[in-house]
Amino acid sequence: MAERAWDFVIVGGGSAGCALANRLSADPGNRVLVLEAGRMDWRWDVVIHMPAALSMGIGNRFYDWQYESEPEPEMGGRRVYHARGKVLGGSSSINGMIFQRGNPMDYDRWSATPGCGAWDWAHCVPYFRRMETCLAGEDEWRGGDGPLKLERGPATSPLFRAFFEAVQQAGHPMTTDVNGYRQEGFNAFDRNVYRGRRLSAARAYLHPVLRRPNLEVVTHAHATRLVMEGNRAVGVEYVRRRGNRSGSPRVARAAEVLLCGGAINSPQLLQLSGIGPAGVLEDAGVAPAVEVPGVGENLQDHLEVYVQYACKQPVSMVPHLAHWRKPWIGLQWLFRGGPGATNHFEAGGFLRSNDDVPWPNLMFHFLPIAIRYDGSVPAAGHGYQFHIGPMFSNSRGWVRIASDDPFAKPKMLFNYLSTPEDQQEWTEAIAIARDIMGQPAFDEFNGGEISPGPDVEGDEAVLDWVRKDAETALHPSCTARMGTDDLGVLDPASLRVHGTDGLRVVDASSMPSITNGNIYAPVMMLAEKSADLILGNTPLPPSEAAQYRHGVSEPDW
């Protein structure tokens, strides 16, 4: 095995890995290697870079790990498909490009986890600001000179205008910015789109610094195990792999190994290396190195459904799906415009499902087209829809290896809909969505409910439909969480794996609990703050910006 020494080896060139590579290699004295199992995100690759092509990468083996859950007990035993980015930029190269920080109280919940006091909202805001350029305007909540340039969806079509009017007719608030003072309410969304192209973590953080002589990125590099000397990680074994063809094992030796593979791949690699629950390792035939019971446990996610309506007027985006239009759409996109430049998720909002919850627990994405993640559309043609789902499921699942084969996919179970609270929130969510869609503002467009359909009435019928139709929002997280309690995997002050040296995890698996919204923005913030912790920098001082709390604060609209 050929060996070369590095200061930092980053396993995974996804969202967090790209941010860390940028920040750690800024010091020319730090030698940084990034190992990415997927392909390069070539500039000419329309599947990645055209926002409207987002459905083309999902399910495609060239871009997607193509995971699926074990049979879900409360969803009729069906397996739920999980797309994960297998390309430089990770899931930020195939996701919906929605940028949502979550609610301030999400991070106060983080800080209540044993040992995580420095991860409250006030200590996280400075890192959110550092990483972004909010093109709608900088203020005490939003940043103005970070790598992530954030456009705000125009949301100007007749269907978006009807949507904004409808939510107010239903008695719900607007907000000036779901990522600012007040999350609760509706408005246009920030998105990782800049000048008509997807701005992935790779394009924002990694490509601008690839010429640094102390930074190297290796694609098609599948990590197979950590190289351990006692309880210390001293490197990573990997193979260059294209399709089913693999090269000889190689070893990248490092002073520090940083796992950034995400909530599925990071616990998988830890377990393959003998770090995890003793029973899981024994069943898989892996010799234990360090027992850490929480590795792979505490799996969390957001489940969502599509509430779809037919549209009586030809104002939706569906004509742009016609094959004969694609050359013209592509030509427009090359000049930074046209329907290819939209990610569709231009507006939405957050609501409380009832008055007993202290902060919004439902997320709504409105689309001026009726379409699923795989690109399929209803036979009805013109339509519009909500993506909707509860944000704070108290169901918990797991990720576990089934063998010592590093190329075998791990098993995972989410236990969706397994608690009474989950089920209640789902019935409330569908009722609220239908109420909004039924407001007078939609009268001129409303051609009838397609999904779930008018025959689905009553709590039990709604739940049965959710069990059959719901899909993941693609937010797996929390499987190697920070905390000093029995199931904590990482030291919150350093992100080091408990019981080890030279080994940290920085990605969605590090989160103590899932946040309220899409998780890309929290993951990037976590990476930014972790870079300071890894480098020994003094953390940024906490923010004094006010935060909205229902029943206490004044609204901003």
Image (tube, rainbow, N blue to C red):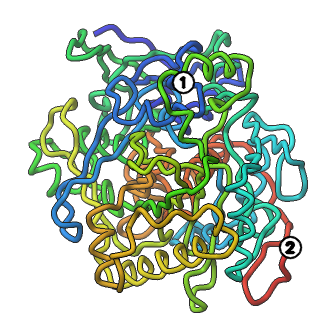
Point out residue 469 in the picture as x, y percentages from the top left corner.
31, 61
Q: Is residue 115 left or right of residue 233?
A: right
| Location of residue 232 by image quarter | top left
Q: Could you tell me which residue is drawn at 44 percent across and 40 percent down?
A: 503
Visible in this render: residue 5?
Answer: yes
Point out residue 345 in the picture as x, y percentages from the top left corner.
61, 49
Q: Could you tell me which residue is drawn at 25 percent across and 45 percent down?
A: 271
Looking at the image, is 394 positioned above or below residue 233? below
Query: Which of the labelled discs sits on residue 327, or is there none?
Result: none
Query: Which of the labelled discs sits on residue 557, or is there none?
Result: 2
Residue on which the image places disc 1 = 7
Q: Could you tell me which residue is drawn at 75 percent across and 41 percent down?
A: 150
The amino acid type of the residue labelled 1 equals Asp
Query: Which of pointers 1 and 2 indicates the residue nearer the eye?
Result: 2
Residues at circles 1 and 2 in contact by the CB criterion of under 8 Å: no
Q: Could you tell me which residue is drawn at 38 percent across and 67 percent down?
A: 452
Cα gap from disc 1 to disc 2, whole angstroms: 50 Å
Point out residue 61 in the picture as x, y percentages from the top left corner.
32, 27
Looking at the image, is 28 positioned above or below residue 168? above
Which is more toward the observer, 126 or 173?
A: 173
